[in-house]
Image (tube, helix red, strand yellow):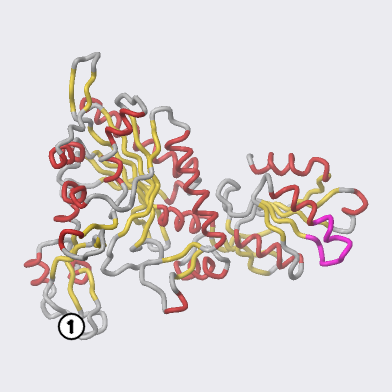
Amino acid sequence: MSQVLKSSVTLETLTNLAKRRGFVFQASEIYGGVAGVYDFGPLGVELAGNIKKAWWDYFVTTRANIYGLDSAILQHPKLWEASGHVAGFTDPMVEDVKNKKRYRADHLAGIDSNDLAELSKALKGKKSPDGNELSEPKVFNMMLATHLGAVEDKSTISYLRPETAGGIYVNFENVRETMRAKIPFGIGQVGKAFRNEISPRDWLFRKRELEQMELQYFVRPQNEKEEYENLRQITWDFFEKTIGLDKKKLKWHEHAKEERAHYAAAAHDVYYEFPLGFKELAGVHDRTDFDLKNHSKSSGKDLGFYDQAANERFTPYVMESSVGLDRLFMAVLSDAYYEEEVKGEKRVVLKLSPTLAPVQVAVLPLSKDEKLIPLALKVYEELKGTLRTEYDETQSIGKRYRRQDEIGTPLCVTIDFDSLKDKAVTVRDRDTMKQKRIKLSNLVENLEATQNE
């Protein structure tokens, strides 16, 4: 029997586990790393891929009126002017005059304001975290600029997209026409975005290179409130029922009027209790007709919708559901982390669902005995085409069990000397640590059924 010591985790413990077990590495670590940029390791890329697939299946594949898109990272600069990013995607900052480190001015001032005069007054007499003098607050654009073409001048400036929704809005008419879509319909996308964060921090929570999973749902203006509440419920169910996050660690945060973007009629964030406390995980927003109207005006292309039956033309309202892959990845690891005491020893286990687990089944010969290896490899070959399977013969069987527990593998298949006689193997459950004997003849069928429970 095991006794749970704790089911929560500190940020330091989580980052150490992620590095040690191959989930997340610091980008360019051998050169000192890049702040706010991380690489997914062998297990991390599998977990991230499983999360993305779960989102895509839930929001896109299983819904008849939702269509997928993969828009380019580089778009026409006018797109970002029309969306308001060029003028408004800014943060106030101050600089340590000695070491040139930059900080969010509102964070150091301890006030929620973007007004430079207010910030200057609040920061008067304050020092940087390193104890040095601070510069006056300045506006800092968070978009990462680049140049398109061989010559670098003002005419070639472009941007790495700061969010993925822009590519959806400018493809609204393309998707509507090619898919013969009628309102309401949605466009889903998973893709990279880039934000030149002043002070990236808290591991994967605030990155410079991130990945977003977004649904933009186009509705009739008169159905705005009903569609918004429906999307809120769909989004909540995804986190609680599909991903399986602890509902006690989830809550809604409704934006007050002063928090919302000027064009938003409503906005709610899904908060999750990270090791940092309750923080934003995802957002649902009623963006009204702001986006399609602005792009229509800026491009000269009418992005309205004509309803022949009603002889009515209108600009659709946009209901948005957006979640960052990196934050959800962090939430999944945090939610799954447990420490337990087993026979006086600490066991670390990630209780990941079989759907999300990077490895679903581990095949473990009891030892490196040459009589066991051929059968173990044969079992591995049979399983790996059906389930995400790992083979491991290094160290004692106990240490291998613990290693699989730490990476979240739901089931371990052990081949022992009795297997050579009775043509059966021992299957160990990660969470209960209970073992049962299964015949090789129906092992694949049995494991598949267990994974789908």
Say whether residue 279 is left or right of residue 23: left
Residue at the far right: name it.
421
Residue at the far top: name it.
309
Give the position of the N terminus as an image quadrant: bottom right
Seen from the viewer's position, the closer of residues 328 and 394 is 394
Seen from the viewer's position, the closer of residues 6 and 189 is 189
- Is residue 369 magenta-colored? yes
Say whether residue 402 is left or right of residue 375: left
Up the image or down, 405 lies above or below 231; here it is: below
Q: Residue at x 85, y 48 (%)?
A: 424
Residue 348 drawn at (x, y percent): 60, 64
What is the three-letter code of the residue carrying label 1? Val
**What residue would you read off at disc 1?**
97
Which element carries disc 1, helix, strand or loop?
loop
Residue 194 drawn at (x, y percent): 31, 59
Up the image or down, 12 lies above or below 415; here it is: below
Residue 217 picture quarter: top left
Residue 77 drawn at (x, y percent): 20, 52
Image: magenta residue range: 365-376
